[in-house]
C-alpha cells in the first residue's frame, strides 16, 4: 500500500464515458473546478492532484439511478456503470477522518455528470493509526468483561423501547441477569428522556445488575445509551462509570465520527456503536457508501461493538450483505482495531444456524429482542433457547433434532417459525 496516498474505490454510473467521469471525480475533489483558474499550475497539480488509478467497466443501463443528471449532446440513451479507483495525496488533508470524508465523499454526489455514485472501499495509510487509536476493548476485552468464551455473547434490547417506568425496567434487568444473560442494551430510541432521566436509569439498572451479580457471581454487561450533544458525552459516560457500569452506547450517526473519536479518548468501558440512520447512507445501491467503508471509519474512531443488522431479519438488507458486514468487522485493519459485530433485528433461535454457517465465527454479539422477551415461557427460556441454538450450530446438529430433548428450544421454534 502506498503510505502517502489514500485510494478510494467508487461504483460509478454516468451518461458520459467512465474515463471522463473518473477525471471529473479526481479533479473536483482535489485541484480542479469547473474551469481552469490562475494558480492551477502543472507543479501544483502534480503535488496535490488526485489521480485516476483504474477504470473497470461493469455494464450499461438505459435508465439513470439518480435525478438531476446533465445529459451530453447526442447522448445515445446509455448509462455506463463501472468501478473507478482514485488516489488522493495524504498531505491534502492529513490523517483526519472528517477531512478525509470531505475529500473522498464531499461534493461528488452532487456532480451532474454522475447518475450514480457509491463509495465502496478505502485504502488508508498507517498514518491514520498514529492519530486514531481504535477500540480499547474490542472482541477480546468484551469477552473478558462478560466472561464469555467459545460462543457469541447473547443479549437482548430493552423492550418496549420507550415508556417503561424505572421500577419496570429494574425488574426486567434483574430477571434477565438472574437468568444468566450476557448483555442488555438500551434501545436507540431511549437515551436521556425527560420521563426517564439517565441518572435515574443508571441508578435503577445498576442496582438490579449488582443484586443479581451478588446471587449469580456473574455481572451482566449493560450498554447505557449516552447519546447526546458533544458536551454531554463525558458527563454521561462518567455517570455510568462512577456507578460501576461496564458499557456505554452511542448512536454513531447522531454524534458523528468526530463525536465517537472524542468519546473514545476518555472512555473507560467498551463503546457499543449503534448505526441507526445507516439506511439513508446506503439503501440506494448507486448512492452513499458501502458498509466496508463505514466500519473502517467506526473502528478507527473507537467503536468496540458495531451493529451489522441480522440474517432473515425485519429490515431490507440481504443476508449476503449482512454476512459481508460481519466479515468486514473481523477482518484485520492496520495494526488491529478489533470490533465485535453486533447481529440484531428480528433475531431468535432460528436465525442462529444460518448466521453461523454463513460466517463461520462466534466472535459476535447475537441480540434478540422479541426472540428472547416474547418466548412463551418467559425471557429466561428465550435466552436459553438462543444459547441452545448456538450449541447445536457449533456442533453441526440440526436445530429441529436438537430441540427434541430441549423444551425451551422446541417452544421457540413453535412460537417464532
Image (cartoon, helix red, strand yellow):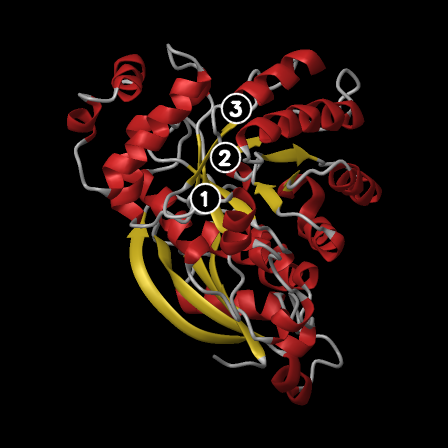
Q: CA distance from mark 3 to mark 2?
A: 10 Å
Q: CA distance from mark 1 to mark 3?
A: 16 Å
Q: Nearer the viewer, residue 402 or 350?
A: 402
Q: Earlier in the sequence, mark 1 or mark 2?
A: 1
In front: mark 3 or mark 2?
3
Q: CA distance from mark 1 to mark 2?
A: 8 Å
Placement of 417 over or under 259, stated as above or below: above
Crowdedness near tag 1: few (<14), some (14–19) or many (≥20) residues, C-alpha within 10 Å? some
Q: Earlier in the sequence, mark 1 or mark 3?
A: 1
Q: Which mark is residue 178?
A: 3
Question: Picture quarter containing residue 94?
Answer: bottom right
Which element carries disc 1, helix, strand or loop? loop
Q: Which mark is residue 375?
A: none
Q: Could you tell me if the residues under marks 1 and 3 are in contact, i.e. CB atoms within 8 Å?
A: no
x, y percentage for residue 100?
Answer: 64, 64
Instruction: Kindly identify the residue that appears in the image at 44 percent across and 47 percent down.
Output: 286
Is there any visible trace of residue 136 in the rendered image?
Answer: yes
Is there any visible trace of residue 113 in the rendered image?
Answer: no
Q: Which mark is residue 148?
A: 1
Question: Picture quarter containing residue 65?
Answer: top left
Image check: 101 left or right of 1? Answer: right
Q: Nearer the viewer, residue 256 or 362?
A: 362
x, y percentage for residue 126?
Answer: 57, 75
Placement of 239 over or under 350, stated as above or below: below
x, y percentage for residue 377?
Answer: 38, 11
x, y percentage for residue 201?
Answer: 73, 24
Instruction: Kindly identify the residue that appears in the image at 18 percent across and 25 percent down.
Output: 400
Q: Could you tell me if the residues under marks 1 and 2 are in contact, i.e. CB atoms within 8 Å?
A: yes
Instruction: Kindly identify the residue that appears in the image at 49 percent across and 53 percent down.
Output: 139
Which element carries disc 2, helix, strand or loop? loop
Q: Which residue is mark 2?
A: 182
Amino acid at each position: 500500500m502506498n503510505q502517502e496516498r489514500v485510494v478510494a474505490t467508487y461504483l460509478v454510473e454516468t451518461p458520459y464515458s467512465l474515463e471522463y467521469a473518473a477525471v471529473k471525480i479526481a479533479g473536483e475533489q482535489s485541484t480542479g473546478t469547473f474551469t481552469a483558474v490562475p494558480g492551477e499550475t502543472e507543479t501544483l497539480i502534480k503535488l496535490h492532484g488526485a489521480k485516476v488509478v483504474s477504470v473497470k467497466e461493469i455494464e450499461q443501463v438505459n435508465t439513470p439511478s439518480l435525478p438531476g443528471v446533465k445529459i451530453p449532446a447526442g447522448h445515445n440513451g446509455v448509462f455506463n456503470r463501472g468501478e473507478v479507483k482514485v488516489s488522493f495525496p495524504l498531505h491534502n488533508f492529513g490523517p483526519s477522518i472528517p477531512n478525509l470524508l470531505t475529500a473522498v465523499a464531499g461534493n461528488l454526489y452532487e456532480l451532474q455528470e454522475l447518475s450514480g455514485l457509491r463509495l465502496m472501499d478505502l485504502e488508508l495509510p498507517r498514518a491514520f493509526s498514529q492519530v486514531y487509536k481504535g477500540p480499547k476493548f474490542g472482541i477480546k476485552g468484551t469477552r473478558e468483561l462478560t466472561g464469555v468464551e467459545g460462543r457469541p455473547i447473547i443479549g437482548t434490547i430493552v423492550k418496549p423501547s420507550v415508556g417503561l417506568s424505572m421500577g419496570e425496567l429494574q425488574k426486567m434487568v434483574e430477571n434477565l441477569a438472574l437468568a444468566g444473560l450476557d448483555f442488555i442494551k438500551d434501545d436507540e430510541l431511549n437515551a436521556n428522556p425527560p420521563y426517564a432521566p439517565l441518572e435515574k436509569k443508571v441508578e435503577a439498572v445498576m442496582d438490579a445488575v449488582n443484586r443479581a451479580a451478588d446471587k449469580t457471581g456473574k455481572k451482566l454487561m449493560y450498554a447505557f445509551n449516552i447519546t447526546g450533544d458533544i458536551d454531554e458525552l463525558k458527563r454521561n459516560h462518567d455517570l455510568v462509570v462512577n456507578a460501576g457500569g461496564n458499557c456505554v452506547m452511542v448512536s454513531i450517526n447522531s454524534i458523528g465520527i468526530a463525536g465517537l473519536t472524542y468519546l473514545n479518548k476518555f472512555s473507560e468501558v467498551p463503546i457499543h456503536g449503534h448505526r441507526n440512520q445507516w439506511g439513508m447512507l446506503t439503501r440506494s445501491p448507486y448512492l452513499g457508501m458501502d458498509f466496508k467503508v463505514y466500519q473502517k471509519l467506526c473502528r478507527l474512531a473507537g467503536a468496540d461493538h458495531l451493529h451489522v443488522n441480522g440474517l432473515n431479519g425485519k429490515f431490507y438488507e440481504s443476508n449476503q450483505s449482512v454476512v459481508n458486514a460481519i466479515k468486514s468487522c473481523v477482518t484485520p485493519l492496520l495494526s488491529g482495531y478489533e470490533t465485535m459485530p453486533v447481529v440484531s433485528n428480528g433475531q431468535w433461535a432460528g436465525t442462529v444456524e444460518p448466521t453461523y454457517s454463513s460466517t463461520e465465527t462466534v466472535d459476535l454479539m447475537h441480540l434478540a429482542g422479541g426472540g428472547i422477551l416474547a418466548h412463551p415461557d418467559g425471557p429466561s427460556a428465550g435466552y436459553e433457547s438462543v444459547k441452545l441454538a448456538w450449541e447445536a450450530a457449533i456442533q453441526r446438529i440440526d436445530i429441529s433434532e436438537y430441540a427434541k430433548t430441549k423444551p425451551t428450544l422446541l417452544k421457540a421454534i413453535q412460537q417464532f417459525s
